[in-house]
Image (cartoon, helix red, strand yellow):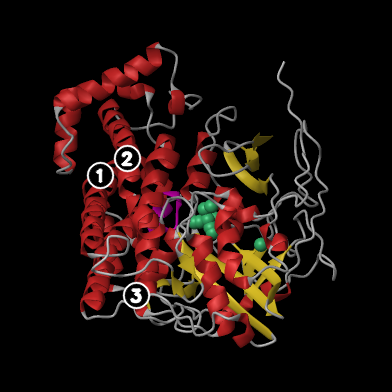
Amino acid sequence: MAKIAVDPVTRIEGHLRIEAQVDAGQITEAWSSCTMWRGIETILEGRDPRDAWYYTQRICGVCTTVHALASVRAVENALDITPPLNAQLIRNLITLSQFVQDHVVHFYHLHALDWVDIVSALDADPAATAALASSISSYPKSSPSHFAAVRSRLQGFVEAGQLGPFSNGYWGHEAYKLPPEANLMAVSHYLDALEFQRDYIRIHAMLGGKNPHLQTYLVGGMAIPIDLNSQDAINADMLSQIRVLLRKGLEFVQQAYIPDVLAVAPFYLEWAGIGGGLGNFMAFGDFPLGGANPAVAPDDLYLPRGVIYDKDLSTVHPLDPLKISEYVTHSWYDYESGDASPLAPFDGETTPNFAGPQPPYEFLDTEGKYSWLKSPRYDGRAVEVGPLARMLVAYASGHERVVEVVDSVLGTLGVGAEVLFSTLGRTAARAIETLVLAEHSLEVLDQLTANIGSGDWDVHNGSKWEPSSWPATAQGFGMHEAPRGGLSHWITIKDQKIDHYQIVVPSTWNGGPRDGNGIGGAYEAALVGTPIADEERPLEILRTIHSFDPCMACAAHVIDKDGNPVVEVTVT
Ligand code: NFE
Ligand code: MG
């Protein structure tokens, strides 16, 4: 019987600590703690609501763009503004390309090394690796000479003692199962994916001026003009450049990401029975097909909205955003009304009260407060959000393309839909989603091109731009599916200023601590039952936690507003 702590969990954004009780080689209980503190919600108060997106987007540089979009949607919902169709389609293109880039980076750079043993790749035969690669995909860089070059590059890293991004892995751990050739193929794609994502995300530079933190959002629409006669606007040339990049994205997903997941999964099929967790899933849905705000037109979305309880795919429950609330019973915050009951986001409070131990410490007091994350609940229940939730809600809702791809992946692996409720299912769902959304990005580009061709160049609805046109008070929410799951921003506007702002984030849903009823979030639930072969090197914890793609920067979004140093580090 042992208690172990992983701190910090690496290959994520931000600062996450996992504590776990291990009995007889299995986790029996787990605690998830976000150990950093930020503060965006409070610094927004008193500011111009039209600027909120600009501040909130800075919450994170990984899921860039998502907080900008949720924020403009919240303000547009509060002030009853409908952006023109072109603006919605440009926003969709920005978001869809964000999904493809973020998910590719997650799979190759943040998650793959939980399954791929870099050191074993040195034993691979380049010719056999080429034969394996060619048997699963038409990906072009698959020759024996290519894999020989990758192997000697890797050998160079190892001999120079400069493993760089590959240092400090649990190499040689008995839970690694891939043959050397599969490991070498994956390392090769890891390196290619670095190049791919850098090139692909130029879509954001075109539509948003830069990446991360795009500059062209605007309450009421977008600030990038459409003008087929101008070099400084969305024109035919830019549309065709975007098309080239979107196609490259789709090809990379078709030829590398999906085949790699299908090649790796058979070696780890036991992970289709591990890491299922809560069994409750929530998706806000996203990608407006027309011009309406998802807050008011939840049925007009490419990916559907809904809730699934207890792994029951026969019923998708309708979702009511007003049933969202957040507990701070085990979070380092206080509610004026006491910490036993949750508050709805419109009434939410962000009052920090750090009661944790000062480092160095062995374990947190998990009976008390132990995380900077709140515990969001839907209708009182803990739910998982993210790619698995979205794909399950879409699958259970009969979304044609999702059903087709999910069934084809399950068929290839020779397994049934029940395996989706697992660590492996979560990772497969993200790959499936990337394919479906990369395809959809080209449909959206077609729709935008056709609309522009019809003579509609409008990108902004300025009817309520002037604050004098606003009511004395207004309230609204913006919902968005960020890569890691359902994201919502909640704003109250009073006398033309932000009176109150709350942000409920995907990694808060998944990574939050126990609630007032002692129920844990998705990370804590998913870890229960996870086998641990070596308590000193808990690779298995990383597999399940990484399958959620944690982002603590988003999830805590709280900062010391005075900029006081909270810790001093001395190097001797
Ligand atoms: Ni910083 Fe984020 C996403 C948001 S957190 S990564 O996706 O919102 O889950
Ligand atoms: Mg919050």
Name the image quarter holding residue 43. Answer: bottom right
Q: Secondary structure at mark 1?
A: helix
Q: Mark 1 or mark 2, which is nearer to you? A: 2
Q: Quadrant of ligand 2?
A: bottom right
Q: Secondary structure at mark 2?
A: helix
Q: Is residue 198 left or right of residue 481?
A: left
Residue at the image position 24 percent from the left and 69 percent from the top:
228
For badge 1, the amino acid type reads Ala
Residues tagged 1 and 2 counted as in contact (Cβ below 8 A): yes
Span shown in magenta: 418-426
Tell me the distance, in whole angstroms, between the alpha carbons under discs 2 and 3. 31 Å
* Mark with earlier residue (2, 3): 3
Quickly name the residue at label 3. Answer: 86
**Horizontal and vertical percent for residue 485?**
49, 61
Residues tagged 2 and 3 counted as in contact (Cβ below 8 A): no
Quickly name the residue at label 1. Answer: 256
Q: Residues within 10 Å of mark 1 (few under 14, many from 20)?
A: many
Quickly name the residue at label 2. Answer: 193
Q: Mark 2 or mark 3, which is nearer to you? A: 3
